[in-house]
Amino acid sequence: MTKKKRFKPVPFFSALLTITFYFILNIGGLQATEITEPAKPSIQWLPENSTVNPASSTSGRITISGESYVVAEGKASYYSNHFHGKKTANGESFNLSHFTAAHRSLPFGTSVRVINLENGKNVVVRINDRGPHSRGRIIDVSPAAAKEIGLFGNGTANVRIEAFD
């Protein structure tokens, strides 16, 4: 008759404890690095009588002309209908029939003219949310605003935005 080998907990837990302390000591030696904010778009101040066309670039860089408005060009998209009734970043409920939009940095309540560069149509929307969360886009508009400027069927379009004080 063979004798069963019994599990011996002392060596097992001793080894586990040794490995645990080893990792704790190694992790404790790592230095915490400071988390920095992502880079904000560069802003260029121009005098009111400037002859530079701030919207001539499609780089998406924000330019402030005088102190009256912000101009940027880039891709725009629109919200899906399934966001209807959900809370926006400023706390109000999203309504797909209102002329609202999401922008990463403009203050809530800012009025923004969105001009579709492909057909020249424009609409004024109010910023009430943060986004867009898709890379390469500068603004998300509501479906009502998207229909107004001919963006609804295409999904995205090149636009110019002019944000008023």
Image (cartoon, helix red, strand yellow):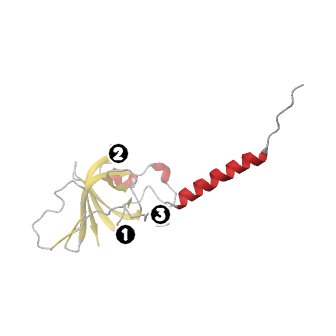
Q: Amino acid at mark 2?
A: Gly
Q: Is residue 135 left or right of residue 31?
A: left
Residue at 68%, 48% in the rendered image: 15
Front in this rendered view, residue 94 or 140 = 140
Q: Name the residue at the top extreme.
A: 1
Q: Are marks 2 and 3 in contact (CB under 8 Å)?
A: no
Please name which of the two marks, 1 or 2, marks the residue nearer to the observer: 1
Q: Secondary structure at mark 3?
A: loop
Q: Secondary structure at mark 1?
A: loop
Identify the residue under disc 1.
Answer: 107
To which quarter of the image does residue 115 belong? bottom left
* Marks 1 and 3, the one that precedes in the sequence: 3
Which quadrant is home to the N terminus?
Answer: top right
Front in this rendered view, residue 50 or 21 = 21
To which quarter of the image does residue 71 belong? bottom left
Which quadrant is home to the C terminus?
Answer: bottom left
* Marks 2 and 3, the one that precedes in the sequence: 3
* Marks 1 and 2, the one that precedes in the sequence: 1
Which of the numbered marks, if any, corresponds to residue 37? none
Q: Are marks 1 and 2 in contact (CB under 8 Å)?
A: no
Q: Position of residue 23 (x, y in %)?
A: 58, 54
Identify the residue under disc 3.
Answer: 32
Identify the residue under disc 2.
Answer: 155
Residue at 41%, 59% in the rendered image: 98
Q: Position of residue 147 (x, y in %)?
A: 34, 50
Please name which of the two marks, 2 or 3, marks the residue nearer to the observer: 3
Q: Position of residue 16 (x, y in %)?
A: 68, 49
